[in-house]
Image: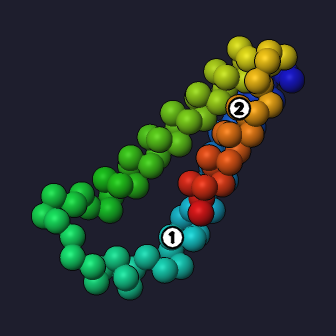
Amino acid sequence: MNRYVIYFLSPVFYISVALAGRAFTAQGIDPWYQAIAKPSYTPPGSVIGTMWTVIYILAAVSLIMFMKHAKGKSGFWPILGLYIVNGIVNAA
């Protein structure tokens, strides 16, 4: 696979995951999340959003590095499948 395609698809995949997760979260987190008892050290929503952004950036970089160095090697497809499953679970 062309490396430029990898550089494009990896961020697009994780941006899609982030947008899907945001859509799911926006549908129903406010009513119940505001009502539950939270400890005093619970970070504000802006910190959580920032951390998820960092996680997705690092995941995209990790996927790019994996795709560059593991193509054609044993175990490539199962590990790529795990990246995809991880993205789906994060979005959900």
First in residue order: circle 2 vs circle 1? 1
Asked if residue 46 is positioned above or below residue 63 in the image, the reply reads below
User: Disc 1 marks which amino acid?
Assistant: Thr
**Mark 1 surroundings within 10 Å by alpha-carbon count, few (fewer than 14), some (14 through 19), many (20 or more):** few
Front residue of 24 and 72: 72
At a point 13% along the width and 64% down the height, the residue shown is 40
Quadrant hosting residue 18:
bottom right
Q: Quadrant of the C terminus?
A: bottom right
Front residue of 91 and 81: 81
At a point 50% along the width and 74% down the height, the residue shown is 26
How far is mark 2 from mark 1, CA to CA? 27 Å
Judge from the rendering whether residue 76 lies leftward or rightward of residue 28; answer left or right: right
Instruction: Tally the numbered discs.
Output: 2
Which element type, helix, strand or loop, lies under badge 2? Answer: helix
Label ID, residue 65: none
Which element type, helix, strand or loop, lies under badge 1? Answer: helix
Judge from the rendering whether residue 5 lies leftward or rightward of residue 57; answer left or right: right
Q: Residue beneath label 1, please?
A: 25
Instruction: Please state which of the two labelled residues, at mark 2 or mark 1, is closer to the viewer.
Output: 2
Where is residue 52 drawn, in percent x and y?
44, 49
Asked if residue 75 is positioned above or below residue 69 in the image, the reply reads below
Label ID, residue 79: 2
**Mark 2 surroundings within 10 Å by alpha-carbon count, few (fewer than 14), some (14 through 19), many (20 or more):** some
Where is residue 11 drawn, in percent x and y?
65, 39
User: Disc 2 marks which amino acid?
Assistant: Ile
Judge from the rendering whether residue 25 lies leftward or rightward of residue 78; answer left or right: left
Q: Quadrant of the N terminus?
A: top right
At a point 80% along the width and 31% down the height, the residue shown is 77
Where is residue 66 drawn, in percent x and y?
67, 23
Res 91 seen here: yes
At a point 66% along the width and 39% down the height, the residue shown is 83
Res 12 seen here: no
